[in-house]
Structures are given as structure tokens and as C-alpha cells.
Amino acid sequence: MYKASSHIKVTQIFSESIDNLNLSKRRSILALLGIIVGSSSIIALLTIGGNAADEAVRIFKNMGTDILVVGFPYSHQNRQPLPSTLDSQALRKAVPGISQIAPITLHSAQLSHNGQNTDASLVGTTQGLADAIGLKFNAGRDLSRYDHRETFAVVGARVAKDLGSLGNPLRVGDLIRIDNYLFNVIGIAESLPATPLIPIVLDESILIPIEGMKRLRPAPEITGIIIKADEADLAALAEVLNSYLTQTFNGREVDVQIPQQLLDGLRHQASTFSYLLAALGGISLLVGGVGVMNVMLMSVAERKREIGIRMALGARQRDIRTLFLLEAVNLSIVGAIAGALLGVAIAFSFTHFSGWEFTLSIMALPLGVGCSLLTGIFFGLYPAISASKLQPAEALRAE
Amino acid sequence: MIISLDGITYSHRTGEQELCVLKDVTLDIMRGQSCAIVGSSGSGKSTLLNILGLLSRPDSGEFHFVGYDMCSASSDVLASIRNQEIGFVFQSFNLLSRLTALDNVALPLSYRGFSRNKARQHALDHLKQVGLEDRVTHLPSELSGGQCQRVAIARALVGNPSLILADEPTGNLDSQTATEILDILLALNREQSVTLIVVTHDIAMANHFDRKLEIRQGKMHEVAVARDDKHV
Ligand SMILES: Nc1ncnc2c1ncn2[C@@H]1O[C@H](COP(=O)(O)OP(=O)(O)OP(=O)(O)O)[C@@H](O)[C@H]1O
Ligand SMILES: [Mg+2]
């Protein structure tokens, strides 16, 4: 067997592959673009998706995880009318482990004050709601148990802003007209972000004593109950609540939601969303990969003669293959790095303008960069192999 | 014996058509000989040189290079032999246009595992031998045809080959430069006893070689060299 000396080092091929890229910049940039778009979208989308999920969960967590929300789904079988309010004392006695109870009835209304009009959701409730959902007051106070006969109102932040005017903001003690009744403002709430758990958007609401709802709406029915628990086992509490309320409301269907279910649902939804986005990024990467393949095939076709010369000078098939593969990989490394920077920048500005907290998700960077590299290798492999399979004499004849 | 061909055949295939170029080539070449290959255009000189240079494989026949069977050798072995034993000089120079003269010459050594610096050092020595030490950093496009061919000769020599194959090395050069290039090649053959095989159209040039081989109808014919006008 003929004894060969040692062969070219991969580091040497690597430095040549870099030289070659430098020398065909314009074409390289074209392929880069695809890779950059692909990897940056994967990274940006995953990061944004992750941050969106975090944000939702965070808002939700602020509300406390000790809340139960009771709803009464409409059913055809049992259309028992619901009472207009709830005997909180009786419920508290029957179901131990409750710290706050707030029944709510939900309507909408047009409000006017001092020539300013606005729409709001009209929420009939009792004291305990503010405490249960963590509502704070800019001015004034919450509804109290002695208010049930009064035309008192607690105003949500957005509603208060709409009803006030420049230099004359809404104050405690002001009168607001709802239909034909004047309500006395006893409290103005701080802004409270909406959450999927609580069925009311507080900023858009005006709270009045639930007993007073009869004045404004014919035959009001309670739409839900918000309960703050004293004990840790919410699932058990929910079960007891369910059976008690079903009994109390003549067999109406009762749905008790606990935060964990919603949290899980939300997380699931958020992660589905980010995987969808990642798939989208994957598709862009695929397009980028086809771009790399195209550029590399062009490069191989254009450099046939060079391949022939290198072979004549002693390059083995694997040396040629490595050279072209490394060129494709270099392209994807540069693309992946540029894409990573771009993707993080996009994600950062998106979360910044959404007012979210920005955290770089652990998976996003390695996933984005790794996918780009794999794309480069995968799509660079075919051109590289086809280059290495050229017959030296034929390659040398090429123009 | 460096080269031994026995009953070599080769056909070019283009689609359906098959063109039989070499029908039965039998040839032995000793180490240190200089041979001119002549023949009319299209007779198969380049085809034969590609086979001798291990750039294409014959269809049938036996081919031994420095005693090794080339027909059964793997393509990696062929690449190693091209790298270590053979230097090529082409009519159209075939320098890599993006590399400097120095890096072009250093290229064969890098395929032998030399570090870049060491390869460049050797390359510089060989560029000096062909009188181009002041053109080291030039790109091929910045060199004249004769200079390019001298770079190519330096590249062919840098790996200390035992055989130099040249396909019409002076075909693109004016007659004065052609003579210079030929002198370099013949001097190599004389002084370093490198085996030299040159394809040429030039009958006068062919007479400077030890042997003159003519391809006619796909066969090899030894022709007597007209000794009287050989250089001294
Ligand atoms: N790749 C190829 N495909 C098909 N036919 C080819 C190919 N290469 C050469 N031929 C044919 O083979 C024959 C021999 O070609 P070759 O190049 O060996 O001739 P040559 O003796 O070198 O001629 P010249 O002196 O013009 O260079 C020619 O008829 C040519 O047309
Ligand atoms: Mg020819």
C-alpha cells in the first residue's frame, strides 16, 4: 500500500473556509439573511412567548392564589331563576374556611357626572370584594355592610378618569347619575390590572351595593360569587361550596373555579402559543437553509475548477467536503450570532413597549443558535458532498 | 521504473455517445527521463496525461505508478500520490485567483498537514528558485503569463515530486517566454532528475527531450528524437 504522509488539518481548512467567505461577501450576505431571519425569529418568538406567559402568570399571582370564583353556567334543563343576592352569613356558617365572600351581579350602564358621560360595567356587590381581589383605594373607602340601603358607589380608575375633567377630577362626595338615580361616590379605586380569573374588569366598573341593583334593573340575578379562602386546600373547599350552593339554588348548575386550574390552562395556552411561534421560526429557518443550500450549490458550480485544482494538488474528497461544509457552517454561525442579537433586541423592545418584565428564556438562545447551525450543516451537506464527488479531470475542464 | 502502462483504454462518454480515445496504450517510463508527448489535436494527449496524473481512471488496462497498482487504489490514495509524487503544470496555469502567489505555491503543502507558516516558508524558497521573490504577495491577475507559469512551476515543485506533468505549458506564452519556461523544466529534469512528461505541439521543442512519444489512432508510438538540435 502506498504510504501517505499526514493530511491537512481541519483548522487549516477552517481558516481557508473563512478566507473564502470573506472573498465572496455579497453572495454570503444573501444566504446570511435567511439564516438571520430564521434564528432571530425563533429566538424573538420564544422569548416573547415566554415573557408573555410569565407576565400573565405574574399578574395572576399578584391577585393571590387563594381566590375561588363561583359561576352559574346557563343550562336548558334547569332554568331556575337565581336570587338577586346571597345570604353571606348562612354560607359562611355552612362552609368553614372562608375569609371573604362577595356576590356580584353584572350589568352595564351609562354614567354621567358634571356633563361627562361614560360607559361602565355596573357591578352590584358587597363589602369584601375589595379585600378578596386586592383592590386599593386612591381616595375614600370600600362599601360596608351598613351601606346596603344607600345609593353609594365605588368608582374604578378608568371610569373615574373619564368622569373627571382637567382641573376638576372626580372626588369622593361627588354625585354620579346612573339612569334616574344619583349615586354618591364614597371611594375611588386604584388601577387594578384585569385578570382572567376575576370576571370583572375593575378599572372599567362602578361598584354599588348589591341590594340596590333592584332600583336600576328589573329582577337582577347574581352572576357570580368571589370568595377568598382561609385554608390551603382549595379543591376540597370548592367541593363543599359546590354542593352547598347547588342545594341552595335549587339544583342550578354551579361552577367553582380555583386559580390553579386557570393557571395551568394559561400556562398550557402560553406554551402552545410559543411552540407555534417557534414552528414559525423553524419555517423561516427552513427557508434560510434552502438559501444556504442555494448559495453553496452556486458556489460549488462556480468553483468547479478550483475544486479540480485542489484535487490535483492533493486534496482528498473529504478535504473538499470539509471545506464546503465549513463554509456553510461559517455562514450559519455568523447568521446565528447576528440572528441571536437581532432576536434578543426584537424581544427586548417588544416586551419593553408592552410594559412587561424582560427575561431571556433559557431555551431560546441555545435553541435558536443550535437550530441555525444544524440548518447550515444539513443544507450544506448536499452541496459539499456533491463537490467532493466531482471527478478531478472533469472539474479541471470547467470554466 | 516510475510509470508502467499496459493496454490502457479510455473512452469519453457524452450522453449516449461513446468516443474511444485511447485504444491500447502500452508505455514504460524510467525515473529521471524526460518525455515529449506529441500528436494531432484531439488525438488524446490531454486524456492520457490526466490518466498519468491520476486525475481520471482508465477504463481497462494496467497502470503501475512507482510499483503500486493505480487501478485498484482508493481515491484517497490517489490524492496522496498526486500530492506527494506529482507536480502539474497546465496550459492555463490554473492558479487560484483569490490566493497570492505565495499561498498558491504553499497550497500543496497544506494538504500534507504543514502549518501555514512552514508551508509559506517552503513556498518562498521555491518562488526564489523561479526568480519571483519580489512578486510573492501578488495575485495571479497582477502577474504576466510567464510569471504565472513560473508560479505554477514553483507550485508543482514545492512538494518535491518525482514526476512533473505539463500539458502544453507554453501554449499561452510568446516564444521567448516559452523558451524560458521550457529551460526551467528541462533544467529541473537534468539537475534534480525529476521525471518530466510534457505534452507539446511544437516539434522543435519536442526534440529537446530524451524521448518523443506520439499518439496516433489511440495507440502510442515511440518516435526517434532529432538529436542534432538538442540544447546543451
Ligand atoms: N470531457 C470530454 N467529454 C467528451 N469528449 C471529450 C472530453 N474530453 C475530450 N474529449 C474528446 O476526446 C478526444 C481527445 O481529447 P484530448 O483533449 O485528449 O485531445 P488532445 O490531444 O489533448 O487535443 P489538443 O491538442 O487539442 O489539446 C477529442 O476528440 C475530444 O473531443
Ligand atoms: Mg490537450
Image (tube, coloured by chain):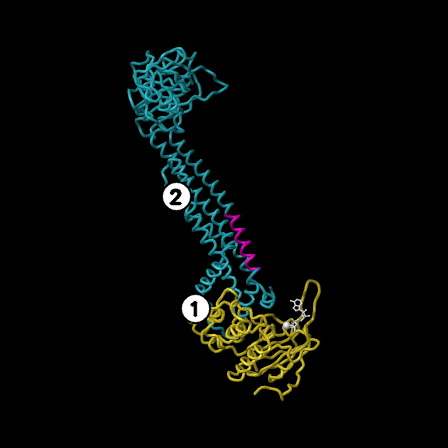
**Which image quarter is the C terminus of chain A in?**
bottom right
Which chain's colour is yellow? Answer: B
Horizontal side of B147 relative to A210 (left or right) equals right
Magenta region, mostly helix, strand or loop? Answer: helix
| Of the two numbered discs 1 and 2 in the rendering, the one whose residue sits closer to the viewer | 1
Which residue has dot 1 on it?
Answer: B116
Mark 1 belongs to which subunit?
A: B
Which residue has dot 2 on it?
Answer: A361
Look at the image and give the residue range highlighted in magenta.
Answer: A285-301
Nearer-the-camera pick, A55 or A110: A110
Q: Judging from the image, what secondary structure is the residue with disc 2 in?
A: loop
* Residue type at the position of mark 1: Arg
Picture coordinates of residue A366 (x, y %)? 41, 49
What is chain A's hue in the picture? cyan
Question: Do badges 1 and 2 share one subunit?
Answer: no
How packed mark 1 is, by other alpha carbons closer than 10 Å (few <14, some 14-19, many 20 or more), is: some
Picture coordinates of residue A266 (x, y %)? 42, 34
Residue A246 is at least partly visible in this image: no
Does B196 appear above or below A260?
Answer: below
Q: Quadrant of ligand 2?
A: bottom right
Mark 2 belongs to which subunit?
A: A
Q: Judging from the image, what secondary structure is the residue with disc 1 in?
A: helix
In the rendered image, residue A295 lying in the magenta stretch gets the answer: yes
- Identified at 47% across, 41% down, the residue is A277
- Identified at 35% across, 27% down, the residue is A192
In the rendered image, residue A198 lying in the magenta stretch gets the answer: no
Toward which corner of the image does residue A44 lie, by quadrant?
top left
Picture mark count: 2
Residue B199 is at least partly visible in this image: yes
Picture coordinates of residue A373 (x, y %)? 46, 53
